């Protein structure tokens, strides 16, 4: 493997020669020049045709050139290119091409012109020459310089690789140029009357008919660029190296040349994503050990420590991670490396949010200050150093912190707008996924479920490719969560199962996908009241260790809901207290606080202590109203209405629920809608009962009106429960309807609904 020159680059030099000879007409010049520059410059990370640029075959050249006519009548540019390609008929011809012909393609320097004049040489005839500073001129100059540096055995390898590289075009060349045809390997063999099957040919060139690619096809520079490209992709998207790319890299790196140092960093990233701590740790040390030998890379020491902290934290070695990042911060401050310092401070902030207990010592030392001070520092420093991606991430972190603390909705929206402005003006695409995930959560909190759904759909349709896999998995789950709360389980599970396996090869993403899928299944089985399935799924989910505290809390909410439905109120109350104690100031969320207050009030109401639940429900509603968490406000009001219902305040219950019913319907949450309708049923039946007790037979017309309302609400509640497959809710509605029919004097319908009630109880699989 040569350092720079490859058969592909020799073919580009031949094409440049055809261009400078004037055989490319003006109509095709732009196309040819575009192709040349695409092969000379580094790949754009968004370009997926990496193989055509790094490991190109002669077929790519034929595809590009065969459709363009040349200045020679009856000949295409491809024909003239082949003629030039096959004019290099021996190693001696290749030597002459590089040593004598390439310099003539360039304009002469002023010193060369003066030297020619002093020597009495006449000026050369006018012709197309390449400027020495142009892209093509710089490429020709470098190719000439690299060839002069080659050892003899390297030039022989380059020639052998070139012979094998152009071999597929021999029959086309021989058919178009029968007078110039010769042996496809070497003209010297042709002059000696030998062919490619002769013993001498096999000694020099090996098995020329072997279809396997030779190592000379790729140079060291190509291998380095290819590894750099893959490292950039893994850092930008996450995930692991694709199997196809892994095979190409393995073939390239097992050649006789030395392995690029960056290959160890690529192996580190791949092993880290795969969950292989030993290999990741080993490759990280190898990479930075090699880079530290280069004096120019001494500054990499603090970045080595930062990478070490990241990997230690991912594998739950928290003390080692904190020690490493503290040393990285100290060295970055000492060396005034603001980029590394900003990255370290950002990582420390997010680490503190995920593991507040582990950060107590660091926070007590005053390194970070409070959360707002840390975010203000990151915003200021990222702007000073033009780290716009960090600026966008910090603004999103600020918006998330304001959402969690229940601050002004206007300031939250302002942070989103500022982050969006940075993304658009600085052309940042990577933070788009995190932006849309957080914005969807904000819309859901204020009760605009349709906007939350629209955000997830926009990402799935427009931003799936070229964005971090982590964001893709999160948004897919959020999308399926909205489908599930409307009862569309089939489509939700289909979308989760349609996630490509390639995106889940990293252990972190696979665990997240498993956890998300399990949460959706758990919610469905809780609604179905399948105790065996729920306990089985719970045991599996509790075994998955996720860093995200919000997801752990969501599992706790589902577990508490299941326990309440089973009637074990004492255990449910203990679980609520345990979840409340697990919340720290660093991971406090006003949504979780309201949810826990509502759950505790529900438990107290169901266990016969509605007076104690009243203050909790009022507190939850007050916090939700002040924080503008409107979805939680509707849930808190429903909880308050249930408490009032237990206190026989039927009129107040009906007024409360009817006042919020339009907003509840807009939330697209079938469980909340069904619960609100069920409360209206009980409230209207309670009012009818009070009228009968107070007025007797005189209340029959008014009583009938309230009963009819209750019947309509029963049907609406039953439909909503049926959408989410809530068997317990359906049985409750059938029991209520059978009771109402019995009270109204319709025994036939009462018996029908009682039969449906018994059928639903059998479907539950338990007799209560």
Image (cartoon, grey):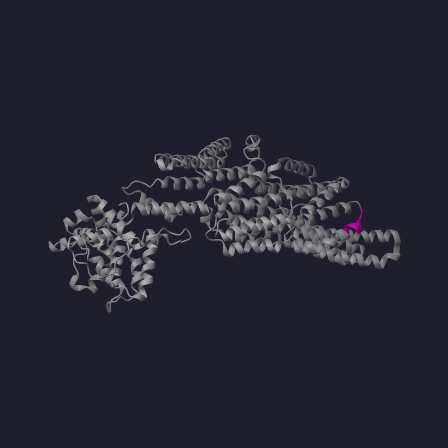
Point out residue 94 in the picture as x, y percentages from the top left corner.
20, 52
In the picture shown, does residue 183 fall above or below 237?
below
Task: Write down the quadrant of residue 28 in the picture.
Answer: bottom left
Q: Nearer the viewer, residue 40 or 311?
A: 40
Magenta span: 648-654
Task: Write down the quadrant of residue 742 in the picture.
Answer: bottom right
Q: Nearer the viewer, residue 725 or 5?
A: 5
Task: Write down the quadrant of residue 591 in the picture.
Answer: top right
Point out residue 565 in the picture as x, y percentages from the top left corner.
67, 44
In this view of the protein, can residue 87 be seen by the observer?
yes
Q: Nearer the viewer, residue 90 or 478?
A: 90
In the picture shown, does residue 756 fall above or below 592?
below
Give the quadrant of the N terminus.
top left
The residue positioned farthest toward the bottom in the image shown: 73
Query: Magenta stretch mostly in which secondary structure?
Result: helix
Asked if the stretch drawn in magenta spans residue 653, the answer is yes
């Amino acid at each position: 493997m040569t350092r720079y020159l490859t058969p592909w680059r020799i073919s580009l030099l031949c094409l440049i020669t055809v261009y400078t000879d004037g055989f490319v007409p003006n109509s095709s010049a732009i196309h040819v020049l575009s192709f040349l520059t695409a092969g000379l410059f580094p790949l754009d990370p968004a370009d997926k045709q990496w193989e055509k640029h790094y490991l190109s075959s002669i077929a790519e050249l034929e595809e590009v050139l065969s459709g363009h006519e040349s200045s020679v009548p009856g000949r295409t540019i491809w024909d003239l290119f082949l003629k030039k390609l096959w004019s290099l008929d021996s190693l001696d011809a290749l030597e002459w091409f590089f040593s004598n012909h390439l310099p003539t393609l360039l304009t002469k320097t002023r010193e060369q012109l003066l030297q020619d004049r002093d020597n009495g040489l006449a000026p050369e005839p006018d012709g197309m020459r390449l400027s020495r500073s142009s892209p093509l001129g710089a490429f020709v100059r470098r190719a000439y310089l690299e060839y002069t540096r080659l050892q003899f055995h390297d030039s022989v390898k380059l020639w052998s690789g070139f012979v094998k590289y152009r071999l597929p075009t021999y029959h086309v060349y021989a058919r178009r140029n029968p007078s110039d045809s010769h042996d496809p390997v070497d003209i010297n063999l042709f002059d000696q009357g030998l062919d490619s099957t002769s013993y001498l040919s096999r000694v020099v060139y090996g098995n020329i008919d072997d279809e396997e690619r030779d190592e000379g096809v790729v140079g060291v520079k190509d291998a380095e660029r290819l590894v750099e490209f893959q490292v950039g992709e893994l850092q930008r998207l996450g995930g692991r190296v694709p199997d196809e790319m892994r095979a190409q890299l393995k073939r390239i790196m097992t050649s006789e040349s030395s392995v690029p140092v960056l290959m160890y960093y690529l192996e580190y990233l791949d092993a880290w994503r795969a969950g292989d701590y030993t290999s990741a740790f080993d490759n990280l040390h190898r990479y930075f050990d090699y880079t530290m030998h280069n004096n120019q890379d001494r500054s990499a020491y603090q970045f080595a420590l930062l990478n070490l902290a990241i990997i230690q934290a991912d594998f739950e070695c928290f003390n080692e991670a904190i020690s490493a990042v503290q040393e990285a911060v100290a060295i970055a401050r000492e060396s005034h490396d603001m980029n590394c310092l900003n990255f370290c401070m950002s990582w420390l902030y997010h680490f503190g949010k995920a593991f507040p207990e582990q950060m107590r010592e660091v926070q007590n030392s005053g390194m970070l200050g409070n959360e707002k001070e840390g975010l203000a520092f990151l915003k200021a420093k990222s702007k000073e150093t033009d780290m716009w991606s960090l600026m966008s991430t910090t603004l999103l972190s600020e918006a998330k912190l304001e959402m969690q603390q229940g601050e002004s909705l206007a300031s939250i929206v302002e942070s989103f707008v500022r982050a969006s402005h940075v993304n658009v003006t600085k052309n940042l695409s990577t933070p788009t996924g995190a932006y849309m995930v957080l914005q969807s959560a904000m819309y859901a909190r204020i009760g605009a479920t349709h906007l939350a759904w629209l955000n997830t759909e926009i990402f799935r349709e427009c931003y799936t490719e070229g964005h971090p896999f982590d964001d893709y998995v999160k948004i897919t789950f959020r999308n399926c969560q909205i489908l599930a709360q409307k009862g569309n389980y089939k489509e939700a599970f289909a979308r989760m199962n349609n996630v490509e396996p390639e995106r889940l090869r990293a252990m972190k993403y696979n665990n997240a996908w498993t956890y998300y899928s399990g949460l959706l299944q758990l919610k469905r089985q809780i609604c179905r009241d399948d105790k065996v399935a729920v306990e089985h799924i719970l045991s599996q989910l509790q075994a998955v260790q996720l860093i995200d505290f919000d997801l752990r809390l969501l599992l706790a909410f589902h577990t508490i809901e299941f326990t309440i439905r089973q009637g074990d109120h004492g255990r449910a109350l203990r679980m609520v207290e345990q979840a409340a104690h697990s919340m720290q100031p660093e991971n406090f969320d006003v949504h979780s606080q309201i949810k826990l207050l509502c759950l505790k009030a529900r438990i107290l109401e169901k266990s016969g202590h509605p007076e104690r639940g009243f203050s909790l429900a009022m507190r939850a509603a007050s916090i939700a109203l002040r924080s503008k968490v409107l979805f939680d406000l509707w849930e808190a009001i429903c909880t308050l209405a249930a408490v009032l219902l237990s206190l026989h305040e039927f009129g107040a219950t009906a007024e409360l629920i009817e006042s919020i019913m339009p907003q509840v319907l807009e939330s697209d949450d079938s469980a909340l809608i069904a619960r609100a309708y069920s409360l209206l049923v009980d409230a209207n039946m309670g009012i009818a009962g009070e009228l009968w007790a107070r007025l007797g037979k005189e209340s029959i017309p008014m009583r009938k009106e309230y009963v009819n309302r209750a019947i309509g609400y029963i049907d609406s509640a039953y439909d909503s429960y049926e959408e989410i497959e809530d068997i317990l809710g359906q049985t409750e509605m059938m029991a209520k309807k059978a009771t109402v029919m019995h009270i109204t004097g319709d025994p036939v319908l009462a018996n029908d609904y009682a039969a449906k009630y018994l059928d639903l109880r059998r479907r539950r699989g338990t007799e209560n």
